[in-house]
Image (tube, rainbow, N blue to C red):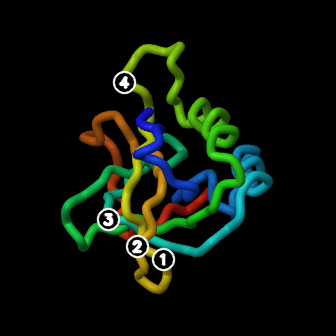
């Protein structure tokens, strides 16, 4: 993880099981350790993985993934838990299921906010593309 002094942000953009409307225990953890800021989007493509979403960045500005932006109370504490949940575990072999990167995310007013985001880190060849960019929670 590139989480040094030069690459820091207190914001996290989520687009699936970590969103407020999810009743997943990790969504509840995130809500307990952050403040909801706004709905937003980023330029990425969204895929159905296996009962959960995976997003990959796209240079095409028409590709959008929609989600929510949070301000984290303590990034070190939150990422210690969420990284493991997202399959980023130094005890496991790479490639990890997701990677956490800083990207520009756009608020509902189109203001760019540099936020962390978990991006799908495996091939998407056989995954179903979700053109709406909105993940429907089960």
Question: Going by the image, does 134 lie left or right of 132?
Answer: right
CB atoms of marks 1 and 3 within 8 Å:
no
Q: Nearer the viewer, residue 28 or 107?
A: 107
Q: Is residue 101 visible?
A: yes
Q: In which quadrant of the rendered image does the C terminus lie?
A: bottom right
CB atoms of marks 2 and 1 within 8 Å:
yes
- Residue hosting label 3: 43
CA gap, disc 3 and disc 2 = 12 Å
Position above or below: 126 against 72: above
- Residue hosting label 1: 107
Q: Residues within 10 Å of mark 1 (few under 14, many from 20)?
A: some
Query: Which circle marks residue 112 in the picture?
Result: 2
Q: Residues within 10 Å of mark 2 (few under 14, many from 20)?
A: some
Tell me which label, 1 or 4, sits earlier in the chain: 4
Helix, strand or loop at label 1? It is strand
Q: Nearer the viewer, mark 1 or mark 3?
A: 1
Helix, strand or loop at label 2? It is strand
Instruction: Report the residue that reaches farthest toward the bottom.
Output: 109
Q: Nearer the viewer, residue 4 or 98?
A: 4
Q: Nearer the viewer, residue 37 or 84?
A: 37
Question: Going by the image, does 71 lie left or right of 55?
Answer: right
């Amino acid at each position: 993880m590139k989480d040094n002094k030069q690459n820091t942000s207190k914001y996290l953009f989520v687009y699936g099981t970590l969103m407020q409307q999810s009743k997943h225990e990790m969504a509840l953890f995130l809500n307990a350790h952050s403040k909801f800021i706004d709905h937003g989007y980023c330029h990425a493509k969204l895929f159905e993985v296996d009962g959960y979403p995976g997003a990959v960045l796209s240079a095409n500005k028409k590709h959008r993934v929609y989600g929510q932006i949070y301000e984290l109370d303590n990034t070190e504490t939150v990422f210690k838990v969420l990284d493991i949940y997202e399959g980023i575990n130094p005890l496991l072999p790479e490639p990890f299921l997701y990677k956490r990167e800083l990207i520009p995310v756009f608020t509902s007013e189109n203001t760019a906010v540099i936020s962390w985001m978990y991006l799908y880190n495996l091939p998407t060849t056989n995954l179903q593309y979700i053109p709406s960019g909105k993940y429907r929670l089960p």
